[in-house]
Image (tube, coloured by chain):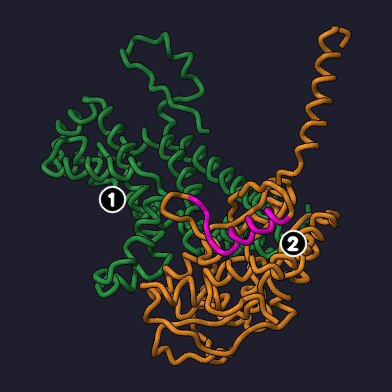
Chain colours: A green, B orange
Amino acid sequence: MNFDLVFKHWDLFLGGVWVTLHLTVIALALGMLIALPASLSMARNTRFSPLARGYVYVFRGTPLLVQTYLIYYGLGQFELVRDSFAWPLLREAWWCAVIAFSLNSGAYTAEILRGAIKTTPKGEIEGAMALGLSGRQVTWLVLMPSAMRRALPQYGNEVVFMLHGTVVASVITIQDILGVGRTVNAKYYIAYEGFLSAAALYMIITFVVVRLFRLVEQRYLKHLNLENVSARKSDSETGEVPVAVPAMR
Amino acid sequence: MKRPEFKKFALAAAFAAFATSAAADELNICVEGAYPPFSEINASGDVVGFDIDITNALCAEMGNSCKLVQSEWDGIIPALLEGKCDAIIASMSITEERKQRIDFSGKYYNSPGRFVAKQGHGLTDSPEGLAGKVIGLQRGTIFQDYMDGEMADVELKLYGTQDEVYLDLVAGRIDAAFADSIAISDGFLKTDQGKDFEFFGRDYSEEKYFGVGAGIGVRKGEEDLRDAFTAAIKTIRENGTYKSINDKYFEVDIYGG
């Protein structure tokens, strides 16, 4: 083990951390933009729901690595694509990764949100309508905020998965954390040092993400009174079954 | 451990150990598989190419039975060091830097490195001529060492395999590639996808970066195996086996001076 080689290239690893975080955040943000309409249309069986279901099925049904390869090496094979307006974007490994990761994250997030929307208590919607809110207001002021709150724990998982999924970027020449690890490994003909350093960095970032989500959950899921879930189990007065919130992993 | 079976077990284990050491003639050889025409995967999934034919010829000469172990280029030296294989035959140049980790037989071929780009590129192979351009090459190669050492300001794109370099060269994601001249001419320029591309610039063969040719890598301390390979290379050079393999792939003798 020779970690001097890793410390010698600390600036590369720092750059890798930046690239990984940058990719993760963009993919999650764009993924959320896709997931909001997709999840709503799936939950409500609108005209577009077959389209949304198809999209979610395809992107959850295939590995992220395959999606990335298809977009990067696959599309680049076609003259038609290379001559098209999209090529300046698809030419860059960075944008190929952003596209693949966003579509992937969008599919998973849509599925998480769909589930959360489906489990919205009827009373919440009825109450909102009784107050005279319009359909649009009900959706965006009551339904979605409530669903997104309940989706928080699962979404925390999605964030961690996406963070780890960005390692795929390293196979299309992007110098993310793993990419830097591979480069350092290859430069000095070593195997463990680069990978171990990358693993440690991912663990640190994951730890921060998990802590952040715990804080956000404490704030937004306060009404579920998480600490006293077991105490409330016997409480049948309200007829409300406490929602079991899966612990973060 | 007083049970009587243990004695039997120990005996069996000792015998098994003896048996494997007696059968140690079997050599595992690490090869790559994405570096045509030296090594590539054919339609039926087997690794074929110059490196593979040389491997078989050397093993036959040494009287060993050899098993090919396919390995990623990135991890091929670690694979040797961990004992996943006993030797590397993968067009690996004998360089001082690699010699710090492993040992090499004598060379079995030697060819210079060269740049390649699309016809009409207008590039020159100097730090100024390549400024602002993106050069693609395989990670962990002598070509990366050279660029890091002599043209540190030129932007590099690093790939896991040489095949991926060609893919992106054709797609236009990189302006030029830097690799072994034979690998480029036979593995790319002569193929359909490489027909619009050409070499540019000089031959690169400074010993500091490019070493003294491709050799067979073995673990340090295995002088016997190393010397056996060196001797076998000499023999197949002399008895015409090398020439017949060479001529199967190349028009010129790639052994080098």
Q: What range of the chain is rendered magenta?
A: B46-61
Residue at the spot 51% in from the left edge and 66% down from the top edge: B36
Q: Is residue B247 magenta?
A: no
Q: Give the answer, above or below, for where A31 lies relative to B10.
A: below
Residue at the left extreme of this rendering: A47
Where is residue B252? Give x, y as percent: 57, 80
Q: Is residue A234 visible?
A: yes
**Mark 1 neighbour density, 10 Å: few (under 14) some (14–19) many (20 or more):** some
Residue at image coords 71%, 66%: B215
Q: Amino acid at mark 2?
A: Ala
Q: Secondary structure at mark 1?
A: helix
Q: Quadrant of residue B190?
A: bottom left
Location of residue B62 with respect to B50 vertically, above or below:
above
Say left or right for B55 vs A114: right
Measuring from the top left, give residue A179's x and y in whole percent: 56, 59
Magenta stretch containing residue B60, yes or no?
yes
Label 1 amino acid?
Answer: Ile
Query: Does residue A19 appear in this view?
Result: no
Question: Is the residue marked by circle 2 packed among few (<14), some (14-19), or many (20+) residues within 10 Å?
Answer: many
> Secondary structure beneath disc 2?
helix
Q: In the rendered structure, are the residues bearing label 1 and label 2 in contact, judged by CB atoms less than 8 Å apart?
A: no
* Residue A218 left/right relative to A63: right
Tell me which corner region of the image, top left, top right, bottom left or bottom right, holds residue B126: bottom right
Residue identifier under label 1: A34
Residue identified by numbered label 2 = B232
Q: Is residue A37 above or below residue A117?
A: below
